[in-house]
Image (cartoon, coloured by chain):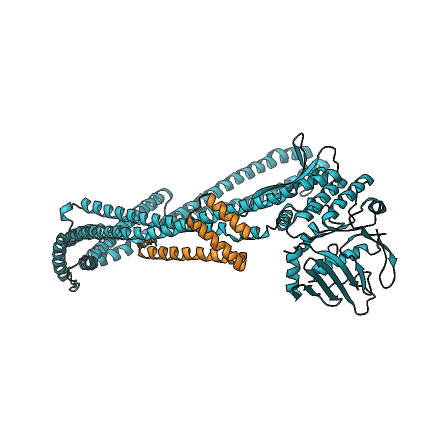
Chain colours: A cyan, B orange
Amino acid sequence: MIRDLVIDSITIEGLRGFNNAQTIKFDGAHALISGKMGTGKSSTLCAIEWALFGDIAHIRCSESRTQAEFINANKIDQKARVLLKLKGSDGDYVIQREKHAKKRDSYLTFSTPNGELEGDVAANKIYSIFGTFEDFHRAIFLHQEAVRAILTENPEERDMALDRLFGLERTRELMSAIPLRLVRKEHEKLDYAKTKVEERIKGATKQAEVEMNKAKKEAFELGLKREEINFQTCRKRFEEIIKNILSVAEDCNVGKPSFLEPSSEDNVSKGLKKAKEVIKSCRMQITASSKIDELQRDRRQINEAKKRLENALTELKNATEEYEKMEKNWGTIEQMEKQEKALKKREQELKNERENIDSTSRLVADGIEVLSKQELKKCPICETKISSKNVLSRLKTKVSVKLEARLSKIGDERNNIREKLLQLADNRKGISKAITKMEEAKEEKHEVEEELGKMLKSKLKDKKLLEEAKEGLSRLNKDLKKAEKALNKKNEVLQEIEDSADICRAIVRVLDKESEYEKIKETFAEEDSQIEILKTQINEMSALFTRLQRISDAIATAQINLARQFIDKGEKKISDYYSRLCGHPYYNSVRIDIDQRNVKGVQKNTYNIKAFNNREGKETLISTRFSTGQMNCAALSIFLSLSSMLERRQEFVILDDPSQNLDPEHKKSLVKVLRDVALENQVIIATQDTELEEEINASFKPKGGFTHMRYEGWTKEGPIIKISKM
Amino acid sequence: MVGLIDLVLKDLKNSGADPETLGLWKSISMWYEEGGPDVVEEEITKKIKEIKTIARKQLKETKEIMPKKKKKKTKR
């Protein structure tokens, strides 16, 4: 594995502020890149990461995108080109990347002492030397935006990254490739299927046994004995049934049925079915020929007609009695009409009289009025001498009073006549109703007499006809009893055959169920061996799971041990850097804690970065407890330690603006630490912090000195860089 | 990877793993060397399928010779 590369030079053209090609020489030595903000320091460092990965961390312009904002706008050919030259013990490594603004992909070539590579092959080679783009940022290039990322990023991503940095990504891959969950799931599935089959076999046997016992119980209930339940008895009985059936079928005229030879249970069973059908046909035939239905129908009809006649006679009797009673009380209709006529005549007479009295009354009233107004001495009509007072008194007392009395009498008499007339009308209505009822009863009686007469073939009427109907019914009942007796006799014969068939059927059923049970038992014995094979496969799956589980556990152990080895190796260095850089008043050391957790059935390493107080045995998670400056110090100590001990480390470290949030004292400590780092690595520091710049110039002093590159401004061609050897 | 293979093998031996487990680990490490994690997964899945195929065949045969479930008569 290549681990000793240092940066020799970088040539940048058309990238960000760089227009024409400009070569910055490092010669494998340490370098301080200083300058004000926006003078091209970061662009120089960006060029290194872009050359290696085709990506720039704070732009994240991946090759799959077409944006080319990092290509210099004044570049005529619209191309960015970077040539990164690295030096190793075995020779030079030259990486060249080129991209056109309008093209999506960049073109990569990688020249190594062993040959020229290009495209994906070159990219894979770079990955094998520097790790992923993210790993490069965790251990080689500490970007100004990413100082604290290692402490604050998603724990899962951090776990993966640290595994990669420790060279454990293969272990991780291998763990994930062992499908433990799948094996367990398949094992469970097979086991479930086996249980189901076993249950089904048990269930079927039990069911057959239950059915067999039920058939036996039914047979015993029919009076059979155990020794009778055999095919010989069954056959004998069946032959008897056939004999009887043939005889009955002939009697009933249902044709001669044919039966199979009762040589087997199956034939007997079929024969019994056929016998059942024949018995059914016979039953229908004898019922049809017995005329019972016909007799029953006649009896029902005569009975109904008889009842109706009885009702009609009662109805007629009642209606006649009612009419006669009315006639006795009120007279005939003619008498009533006569009476009504007389009353109406009298009423007319009274009406006329009243009208006469009314005119006389008006005349008397006029006379009274005249006499009460003037005192007449002569009668105005006959000129006879009169005394007004006398005439007035006589008119008032004798004429007027008498007239009023008469009027009252007429009124009373007229009221009386009206009441009588109303009564007469009611009576007439009642008598008419009674007559109608009587007529209707007569009509019904006549109708029923006709009907019943037809049924009985009789011309008798009234009660005589009823007597005739009674006699007819009695005759029908006798016939019916006779027919029923004959039918019952035939049915009894059929029933006997049917009972015998039932017994035969019960024997067949028991024999059938017994054989079914035996068959299942036989099959069960066979299935046991089948289940055994299934069990072997399940055990095989279980064994595979156990083996894979053991292997997985062993890999997990190896994984944690390897990670622990790395961490133990670097622990002293991390704590040393931390105590020198941070000088925390309470937590005096920092450590990467390792544990394992189960992620979807796979054991994976998980890392926590914690600070400790060794004297009091207290610990805390750095990301949740420390200030930004303290967190920067912790992150720097971890970064610098990791960069010196990791799988894919190289002999150079790039720090972009590492003094963020540090006070002058901590900056001094940082320079001292960097001096130690420079003993093993080429250190390239970019900063805009003049305090740090001064401190580096004053006390960095690595072996062989360092190059100070001052970025002082821009021309159209690119940044103005003044280089001095320190 | 060689280091990891030996480490795992050592751990398995120390924990008294049977020869089949050791053999399986050797196969896994060989598959990984040959084609990476995909081949490992593929080969183990193949093994699972082999067991499953035999088991399913047996299961099918067993079901075939088993008494059929009687259908319940539906009353009309």
What residue is at 76 percent from the left and 65 percent from the top? A81
Residue A61 sits in quarter: bottom right
Tell me, yes or no, if residue A722 can be seen here. yes
Residue A439 lies, in percent from the top left, at 33, 52
What residue is at 75 percent from the left and 36 percent from the top? A583
Residue A709 lies, in percent from the top left, at 83, 54
Give the total of numbered labels: 0
Residue A500 lies, in percent from the top left, at 15, 52
For residue A698, side relative to residue A572 (left or right): right
Along the line of sight, which residue is nearer the eye, B33 or A239? B33
For residue A463, side relative to residue A164 (left or right): left
Residue B65 lies, in percent from the top left, at 31, 56
For residue A186, side relative to residue A34 (left or right): left
Viewport quadrant of the N terminus of chain A? bottom right
Tell which residue pokes out farthest to the top in this image: A616
Along the line of sight, which residue is nearer the eye, A249 or A636? A636
Along the line of sight, which residue is nearer the eye, A471 or A483? A483
Tell me, yes or no, if residue A175 can be seen here. no
Tell which residue pokes out farthest to the bottom in this image: A77
Along the line of sight, which residue is nearer the eye, A184 or A205? A184
